[in-house]
Image: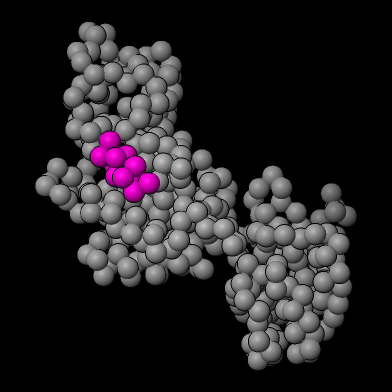
Amino acid sequence: MKASDLSVAHQWRGRVVDLSDHRDSAGWRAAQALALEGAEVFVGDSPARDRARRFDQLAKARGLEHLTLQWAGESRGEILSGLCPPHAEKIALKDAEVPSEGRENPTGVVTLVGGGPGDPSLLTIAALTAIAHADVVLLDRLGIALNVVELAPAALVIDVGKAPGRHKMPQEEIHETMLAFAREGARVVRLKGGDPFIFGRGGEEWRFLAENGVRVEVVPGITSGLSVPAHAGVSATYREVTRAVTIISGHQPFNQSELSSLVSLGSTIVILMGVATFPSTVAGLREAGLPDSTGVALLEKGYTSNERHTFTTLGTAIEDARSRKVTNPAIIVIGDVVGVREVSAEISEAQG
């Protein structure tokens, strides 16, 4: 929640705000948002602040200090207790609390949120709402660019991101961490890059939490497998070119049967996590009969300032990828739709 969410007509720097009537989590989130924008906020005795501090204590007890990007109970701005001055402005909040809050040892909820390809403007409204209302956010590596600290000013934010071969927290420990905070009554957001159910292990997390009696909600996200090619002008399907698209993980090498099936299907092939296995993939596709003239797009670091595109063909793709030093994260697109993109780009350039 930003202060601008409370009223787009107000400027909050230097204002004195009375939130002492709001003792719930909505009031604490609003206090944090307003304080971050420069207001002097009075909250009085705040059970919600004490609740947030419980989550901080749990994180410390679990040894997560080195992964914590933001503490839930920490005041990031001028938040004061005690009697408000007479000139303080009162704000009416419409934010409703979850029914479980205030009960003895309530069970929280975990929301699996798809963060999209990394551009904050591509977060859905449901994702923004879940993040703004979170007590705890467990953040994937691909979600860090979304500036979660600003979107969730009153949340405990923990970076559990995993890079190839480097895991800050094993998946089993992520499961247990979500469970521990949910049992403490927290609204937990598990923020993932792309969509939670496209190579995001969201299904595994849902099953684990469900087996342990925790309610799980799912907010889908825009998968990088389709959005990054679209951003580069590559249409995954195209009438009279291909009517199918296969999104596949290249984390492990494909066997020849799999590659032959892909060639027989005639679909656009979109590979995630496939840079390391790219040479063997290209060799196998050529052996399965895919023509050397087939288009290949290597789309690195989509939706970042370092985004880079390499357009080539199957016959020269290995050499081009090596000379360009293509690295992860990258989306690989193989199929005739890449050639369609080149034609469209040439038309645009000629008219521009």
Q: How many marks?
A: 0
Q: Is residue 226 above or below residue 27?
A: below
Read off the magenta span.
Answer: 52-63
- Which residue is more in the foreground, 327 or 41? 327
Q: Where does the image place residue 134, in percent across and percent down from the top left?
A: 34, 45
- Screen quadrant of the N terminus: top left
* Picture quadrant of residue 157: top left
Q: Main secondary structure of the magenta part?
A: helix
Q: Is residue 149 above or below residue 321?
A: above
- The answer to whether residue 25 is seen in the rendering is no
Residue at figure coordinates x 86%, y 62% from the top left = 323
- The answer to whether residue 35 is seen in the rendering is yes
- Judged left or right of residue 247, residue 64 is left
- Which residue is more in the foreground, 219 or 138? 138
Q: Where does the image place residue 320, in percent across and percent down from the top left?
A: 85, 66
Q: Is residue 53 magenta?
A: yes
* Picture quadrant of residue 217: bottom left
Q: Is residue 78 magenta?
A: no
